[in-house]
Structure formats: structure tokens, C-alpha cells
Amino acid sequence: MPKNNTHWWCDPSTEYAFVGFSYEVTACQTPEQLHEEFADIRNHFSSRYVRLYGACDRDGFYDDIVNAAWANDLGVHALIWFGFDGSDIWETRRDTLLAALHANPLAKFITRGVQFGSEPLYDNVLPHNVLAQQVLLAKQNLSSLNIPVTVSELAYGYQERGGAQDVLDAIDFINIHMLPFFDQNASTANNSWPLVLNDLDWFIEHGDGKKMYFDENGWPSVTSPNVQPNSPYAVSDIPNEHEYFVLLDSKCEYLKAVEGGGVGWFAHIYSDNMEPGYGIYNSSGHLKFPFHPRTHC
């Protein structure tokens, strides 16, 4: 083992195109399931990263994530999850995660970054100046571990808070929610590139050249009470979910050239058991469509 992770990670400019999956942990997966699915994520799809979504409050759970990621050569975008109930449990989750990152000697070698999320600005869980302060405090806490900090958020979440430039200035890299199905101009996935560019261009304009990822990034194959379009023309079915990723894959060269070292993208989400309609796998564990996006171009 090296003494620290200063020269551990690949240059972020190599992290463009497909980089991995969003992976929800609300089910508090067993260590065995984490190992099995992380192995699939790494070996079947050549992923570099898992971006955590949701929360599991079981004692030692992040150590299970670390072990599964280490065993399968994956990095992790860890998450401080606010949830949707307006409670302050996120503070406990923050403290638990930061403590685990310091206590587990492997953690700094698999944790590519820590996110505050998901969509804390859009969900109005904290005023943007308070969120920016939380980011700065977390950066300070993790500085000895060389683990950067970000916020996982929609462009609209920043825009409706007057741009929340204090948050954009505080974060180390930008984790962007790219969900064009919800755009008021949405129709089919293969027509969504202008919608993607609209949000991406906003981050290019206001992001000060920071590295960018599309982390919560996908197109639903079904609607549900919490997944409703804002356009009467938006189509949710499996072909459109597939077409969205085909579209991103076809734009590899464009995304590679974006300032800040290119844009890496995650597929949201690994399985329909995590979020109905968004999974690459359906709820019985079968791939919904062929999925082998490029990891470089």
C-alpha cells in the first residue's frame, strides 16, 4: 500500500464517457450481495465507479461498501443522504460517514469523493449558503485524507436559488443530475441532446472549469407517482431508456472535449429494484436492453 492517495487516482481528464452506475443502498445489501453486484458492475460493464444513492444506517455499512469496492477495483462516490422527510438525520449520516472515512485505512483509496445529496437545493433542505458552509466544513474534515467534496444536484436546483454560486464555488467537482425526461420540452430520448446541452452549458458557464460528471443520469422506462413528465410529449418506455444511453454514447467525443477534463457519466440506476423504471436490469435481474457503452474514445 502507498502511504497516501496523492498519486493514486487516474487523472480526471481520463474520466469521460461511461464511468459506472448509480447504486441505491436503501435495501442495506448484505456484504455478499455488494460483492456480487460490484463484481458485475466492474467486470460486465468495465465500470470505474459506483455512485451511491439513498442511505443505509446499519452500523459498519460503509465498511462493507469499502470492502466490496476494494475487492472489485471500483471507486465510490459516497453520499450524505438528506432524504425527503425534512429531518436532521443527515447530520448523523454525515458524522458517521466522515468517521468511517478516517477510521478505515482502505477508505481513502476507494472513495473518489463525498456528495451531499440528492438535490438538496431543489428539495430546499438547506439554504444555499448553509449548504456551501457544510461543503467547506466537510472539505476541511477530509483534507488530510485527500477526499474531495461535492453536491449532487440539478441545474434547476442552482438556478432557482439565484445560481447558488457560493455552492458551486465551494465544491471540488460538479455532480450533475441529468434527467431530460422531466424537461418541459421533453419528447423522445433521441431528441433530448439539446436539453442535455442546455443544462451542461449552464454548468460550463458557472462552474469555473471544474471536473463534471452526470451522476443521476437516465431516462425512465415507466412512470410512477413520483416519476411524472412535465411535457405531454415525453415518452417513457424501454426503447427510450435505451436510446438515451445510446445518445450519450454517440456523443463520447463531444463529452471528452468539454472543459475541465471532459464529462464522465453514470447510468442511473443499476436495477429496477432500486428505482422502478430506471434500472439497467429489470426487477427479475435481466438486462432490459443491450448495454455496453464506451468507456473511452
Image (cartoon, helix red, strand yellow):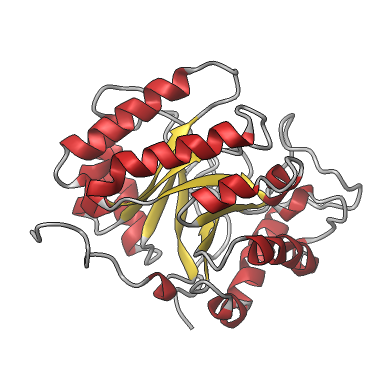
Q: Compared to 91, does 11 lie above or below?
A: below
Q: Is residue 115 left or right of residue 102?
A: right
Q: Is residue 138 left or right of residue 213?
A: left
Q: Is residue 262 visible?
A: yes
- Report the front residue among 180 and 227: 180
Q: Compared to 219, does 13 lie above or below?
A: below
Q: Is residue 137 left or right of residue 256?
A: left
Q: Is residue 253 left or right of residue 143?
A: right
Q: How many marks?
A: 0
Q: Position of residue 114 (x, y in %)?
A: 40, 45
Which residue appears at 48% of the width and 33% of the height? 54
Quarter-of-image position of residue 47: bottom left
Q: Compared to 56, does 213 lie above or below?
A: below
Which residue appears at 14% of the width and 44% of the height? 105
Q: Position of residue 188 (x, y in %)?
A: 80, 60
Q: Quadrant of the N terminus?
A: bottom left
Q: Residue pushed farthest right?
A: 232
Which residue appears at 36% of the width and 23% of the height? 57
Which residue appears at 68% of the width and 46% of the height? 158
- Report the front residue among 123 and 269: 123
- Report the front residue among 247 and 284: 247
Q: Is residue 216 visible?
A: no
